[in-house]
Amino acid sequence: MIEKELKTTIQIFDGINELPLSIQNLMKSAFEARDNAYAPYSKFKVGAALILDTGEVVTGNNQENASYPSGLCAERTAIYAAGANYPKAIIKAMAISATSEKHDVLEPIAPCGACRQAIAEYEQKQKQPIEIYFTGTAGKVIKVDALLDILPLAFNNKFL
């Protein structure tokens, strides 16, 4: 038997004002997207914003449906929009923010498993990591340098 230890390094900022100006602006785009989310059932709104190597910002938000599996998370909405509209662009960074109409979201909210897998696919496609910044409604922001920092041993095309 071989035992391996997997380590992850994250950076924790006290708020968006500690982030580089370009990422502050990206996070503000995520806030705007979040506020426009369609979440009539869960009342949990998420917004995501991507910055491309072209300077273009692509946003997405969660889109719910009465048939729950038919909805889509903010991160996948944004990343698929970028892939569809800017197929040759490199995604440099992603900002994510979540809020709830039911309670205060005081902790940073990381992408769900399905979104992590979708982001992993784009990192593999572009052969470059994507910096990910995530927060709740406000407050602390967590940054990871790449999706693999929060999804080690990700499934990829080498397994197919």
Image (tube, grey):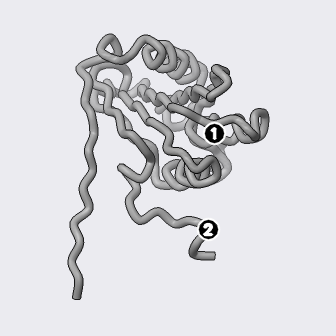
Q: Residues within 10 Å of mark 2 (few under 14, many from 20)?
A: few
Name the element at disc 2. helix
Task: Measure how far apart labels 2 and 1 are at the Cα level.
Answer: 18 Å
Q: What residue type is labelled 2?
A: Asn
Q: Which of 130 and 106 is in front in this view?
A: 130
Q: How far across and how far down the image is residue 114, in percent?
A: 53, 54
34 above or below 4?
above
Asked where in the image residue 107 lies, by quadrant, the reply is top left
| Residue 79, numbered label | 1
Q: Residues within 10 Å of mark 1 (few under 14, many from 20)?
A: many
Q: Which of marks 2 and 1 is nearer the N terminus?
A: 1
24 above or below 136?
above
Point 37% across, 22% down: residue: 137
28 sits left or right of 3 in the view: right
124 above or below 111?
below
Q: In which quarter of the image is the N terminus?
A: bottom left
137 sits left or right of 129 in the view: left
Q: How far across and how far down the image is residue 109, in percent?
A: 37, 36
Mark 2 against mark 1, which lies toward the viewer? 2
Q: Which amino acid does label 1 sit on?
A: Ile
Name the element at disc 1. helix
Residue placed under numbered mark 2 in the picture: 157
Point 49% across, 50% down: residue: 116
Q: How far across and how far down the image is residue 34, in percent?
A: 53, 23
Asked where in the image residue 140 lies, by quadrant, the reply is top left
